[in-house]
């Protein structure tokens, strides 16, 4: 089959572009370490969240030095806890699940973004920097009140965080 | 019918019965376009808060479901079946085997879409206990009325019979021409339909095994990740199902309009084979951010997706080369000077070229979507509809509209009412989409979500990026309004065209490619081989993920409830369904008789 010389050149350039794109994604995974939401968390009974150790009381917990875990429940039409308060300059892992339908969990303007599916737990780890208040929105259509489903993620100073934790919020 | 003076006969002169089907299919498509455009303008103005008086924010989702289903499924597929019927009959130069079968699949598709359409539109009427506010993706556990799912199933079965009709016609031709290569247009139709059979089997299974029985109350719950994965098994190849008719036009009709001929027939075949092989094993890239699916499966899907760029990049070369050849045949010279020799005053030419240009832009934003880790930034933001309004909303839709100016005279013997309005219309679409899509991409980067009636929130404000949120809203509203006007001009022009008297002398022929089919290796025409490989790739990409999803959540879901947006008890639904079905079928037959006349 006859392939024109320019066409061969174009073909080679196209394949190079494709390999570069795959390479850049691979680099993102192994270099900066961008992990995808995965199947690391076992499936969960969406109807039995009230008996679940983590999700019966959605909250933020310290699990190590500068390491925190946030257990979040999405429902028609809101998030628990609200606001989600986390300290500055720390590493926070969100565990998010749904009580009812499929939702989204997006910290607006950042790359903290995941689907939330009933029966599954989404795990994403982010690093916080300066104190700032972020909007938390559901970015998957979830029913008639979808547009009012919002929350807050407040990144606060260490001092303020400790004050809030000892305020007896979860005791 | 008048024999053309030049002796050249149009499609309708040679195949009047088939031309009637093509016209009926395209009119069905344009009816869907009209409805979709009306919901489109309502949504644009509502979402951007320019005008929220017409519908409530709750009804916004009914409107959005209608916009998605009517445009993405109905407009595209009806145009496709019309175009493919034309392409098969024209390129094989023989009639279909049995026109009654042809009208049967048309009737099934029309009845199915009417059923689904009724279930959606009933959502606007509070008195009716029926709705289907589940959007185009119908993710469980949100539930639609059973009529919604039943209609989809009937529609898909109709499309399967259409494919069988074309395959059988080709086989009959093959018996008459045992040693000839498959004509290029027929080859394109057959590979596209082979892909469609593979892809649509998953969504048909999801609807018939899970969603329809669940909506009727036979099963209590479904596994949302499973039905979602089966949807995307279908949901990515369906975008190529929309795109392949546009490619068929770019490869076989556009070069002729430009005054030349297709550069390479073999490369065109290679491209369609690549689409058959690679369109399906990529659907998980829509689920990069889904829990319960291992990262490795996502990585495989990402790699396949990137390779799927190849056939589109090859198309860009071939189409531009063919058009350049046409320009040089018309006396064009120079490195870029040949561009001035192209027939820019023809709406069919300018429309398809602008569609192709926007497809290139859509391709680049698609690379961002496909880039697994950048996907976190834009997933489910309005960036994504910004992307697919460039691809399906322009590369496909604008090509279809532009092609109509060329093909409608061929299938009706009626000249277009006003080609100047046509030219204005395609340019207006381009300008409107440039404004709307660009602003949607920019808002997506700010984190503005898609699929919402009110993207502004009480508790926070978006940071400003390439223009602030409010300013971008205005651009979206202006762009959407121009697109609506463009659609009105298109439909109006076509309606006036239908009132034109029939004339003779409109026949157009399509020249063969510069590098013809004899240069193409025979193996390219071995459809069994390619379908076999495509199936193997699908099994490799999907067997393990589907197995894992079922073993995690079970076939019927881990304790997930039902969230009906309609609340009819299942028994009532069952009792009502036959009556509704009968009514719909009677309507459809009446409509069919109308169109067939």
Image (spheres, helix red, strand yellow):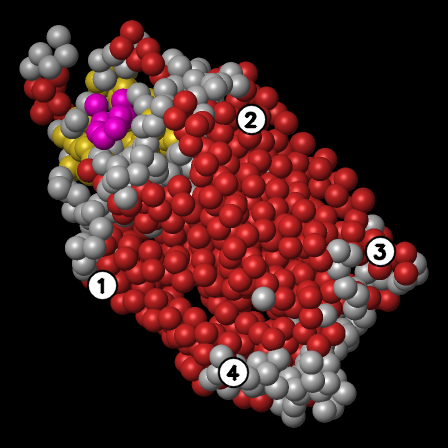
Q: Which residues are magenta?
A: A73-80
**Of label 1 and label 4, which has the lower sequence position?**
1
As rendered, which of B455 and A135 lies closer to the eye?
B455
Can you tell which of label 3 and label 1 is closer to the viewer? 3
Q: Is residue B184 left or right of residue B502?
A: right
Disc number for residue B474: 1
Position above or below: B199 against B468 = above
Q: For mark 3, what is the residue?
A: B172
Task: For mark 1, give the secondary structure.
Answer: helix
* Marks 1 and 4, how far apart at CA: 39 Å
Disc number for residue B209: 2
The reply to whether the C-beta atoms of the residues labelled 2 and 3 are less than 8 Å apart is: no
As rendered, which of A93 and B445 lies closer to the eye?
B445
The reply to whether the C-beta atoms of the residues labelled 2 and 4 are less than 8 Å apart is: no
Where is the N terminus of chain B found, in terms of image quarters?
Answer: bottom right
Q: For mark 4, what is the residue?
A: B500
Q: Are marks 2 and 3 on the same chain?
A: yes
Residue sitting at 13 percent across and 39 percent down?
B459
The chain letter under disc 1 is B
Q: Residues within 10 Å of mark 3 (few under 14, many from 20)?
A: some
Task: For mark 3, give the secondary structure.
Answer: helix
Residue B93 in magenta stretch? no
**Which quadrant of the structure image shows residue A170?**
top left
* Marks 3 and 4, how far apart at CA: 37 Å
**Of label 2 and label 3, which has the lower sequence position?**
3
Task: For mark 2, give the secondary structure.
Answer: helix
The chain letter under disc 4 is B
Regarding residue B420, the answer to whether it shows in the image is: yes
Main SS, magenta residues: strand
């Amino acid at each position: 089959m006859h392939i024109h010389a320019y066409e061969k050149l174009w073909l080679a350039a196209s394949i190079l572009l494709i390999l570069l794109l795959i390479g850049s994604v691979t680099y993102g995974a192994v270099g900066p370490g961008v992990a995808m939401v995965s199947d690391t968390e076992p499936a969960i009974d969406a109807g039995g969240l009230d008996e679940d150790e983590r999700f019966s009381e959605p909250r933020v917990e310290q699990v190590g030095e500068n390491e925190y875990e946030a257990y979040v429940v999405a429902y028609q039409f809101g998030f628990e806890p609200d606001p989600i308060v986390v300290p500055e300059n720390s590493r926070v892992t969100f565990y998010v699940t749904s009580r009812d339908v499929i939702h989204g969990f997006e910290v607006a303007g950042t790359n903290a973004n995941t689907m939330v599916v009933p029966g599954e737990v989404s795990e994403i780890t982010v690093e916080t920097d300066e104190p700032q208040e972020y909007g938390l929105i559901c970015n998957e259509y979830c029913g008639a009140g979808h547009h009012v489903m919002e929350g807050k993620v407040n990144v606060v100073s260490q001092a303020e965080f400790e004050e809030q934790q000892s305020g007896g919020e979860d005791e | 019918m008048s024999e053309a003076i030049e002796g050249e006969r149009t499609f309708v002169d040679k195949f009047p019965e088939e031309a009637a089907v093509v016209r009926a299919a395209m009119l069905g498509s344009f009816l869907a376009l009209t409805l979709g455009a009306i919901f489109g303008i309502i949504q644009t103005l509502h979402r951007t808060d320019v005008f929220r008086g017409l519908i409530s924010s709750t009804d916004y989702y009914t409107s959005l479901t209608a916009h998605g289903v009517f445009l993405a499924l109905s407009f595209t597929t009806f145009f496709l079946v019309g175009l493919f019927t034309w392409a098969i009959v024209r390129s094989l130069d023989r009639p279909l085997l049995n026109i009654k079968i042809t009208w049967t699949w048309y009737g099934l598709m029309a009845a199915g879409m009417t059923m689904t359409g009724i279930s959606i539109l009933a959502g606007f009427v509070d008195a009716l206990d029926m709705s289907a506010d589940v959007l185009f993706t119908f993710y469980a556990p949100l539930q639609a009325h059973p009529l919604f799912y039943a209609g989809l199933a009937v529609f898909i079965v109709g499309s399967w019979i259409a494919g069988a009709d074309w395959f059988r016609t080709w086989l009959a031709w093959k018996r008459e021409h045992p040693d000839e290569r498959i004509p290029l247009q027929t080859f394109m139709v057959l590979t596209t339909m082979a892909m469609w059979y593979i892809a649509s089997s998953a969504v048909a299974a999801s609807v018939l095994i899970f969603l329809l029985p669940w909506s009727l109350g036979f099963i209590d719950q479904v596994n949302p990740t499973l039905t979602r994965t089966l949807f995307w098994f279908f949901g990515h190849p369906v975008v190529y199902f929309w795109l392949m008719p546009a490619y068929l036009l770019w490869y076989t009709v556009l070069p002729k309009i430009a005054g030349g001929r297709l550069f390479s027939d073999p490369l065109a075949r290679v491209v369609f084979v690549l689409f058959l092989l690679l369109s399906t094993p990529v659907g998980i890239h829509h689920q990069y951010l889904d829990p319960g699916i291992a990262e490795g499966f996502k990585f495989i899907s990402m790699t396949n997706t990137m390779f799927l760029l190849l056939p589109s990049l090859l198309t860009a070369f071939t189409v531009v080369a063919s058009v350049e050849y046409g320009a040089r045949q018309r006396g064009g010279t120079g490195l870029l000077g040949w561009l001035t020799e192209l027939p820019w005053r023809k709406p069919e030419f300018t429309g398809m070229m602008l569609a192709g240009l926007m497809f290139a832009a859509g391709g680049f934003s698609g690379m961002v979507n496909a880039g697994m880790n950048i996907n976190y930034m834009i997933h489910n933001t309005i960036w994504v509809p910004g992307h697919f309004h460039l691809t399906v909303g322009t590369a496909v839709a604008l090509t279809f509209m532009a092609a109509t100016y060329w093909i409608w005279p061929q299938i009706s013997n009626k000249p277009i009412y006003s080609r100047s309005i046509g030219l204005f219309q395609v340019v207006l679409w381009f300008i409107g989409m440039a404004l709307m899509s660009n602003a949607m991409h920019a808002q997506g980067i700010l984190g503005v979500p898609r699929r919402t009636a009110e993207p502004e929130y009480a508790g926070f404000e978006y940071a400003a990026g390439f223009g602030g949120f409010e300013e971008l809203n205005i651009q979206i509203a202006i762009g959407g309004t121009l697109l609506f006007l463009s659609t009105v001009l298109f439909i109006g022009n076509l309606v006036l065209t239908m009132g034109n008297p029939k004339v003779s002398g409109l026949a157009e022929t399509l020249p063969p490619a510069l590098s013809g089919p004899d240069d193409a290796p025979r193996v390219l025409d071995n459809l069994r081989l390619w379908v076999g490989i495509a199936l193997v790739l699908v099994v490799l990409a999907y067997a393990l993920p589907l197995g894992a999803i079922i073993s995690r959540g079970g076939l019927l879901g881990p304790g997930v409830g039902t969230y009906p947006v309609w609340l009819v008890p299942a028994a009532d639904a069952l009792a009502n369904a036959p009556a509704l079905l009968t009514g719909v079928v009677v309507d459809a037959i009446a409509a069919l008789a109308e169109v067939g006349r």
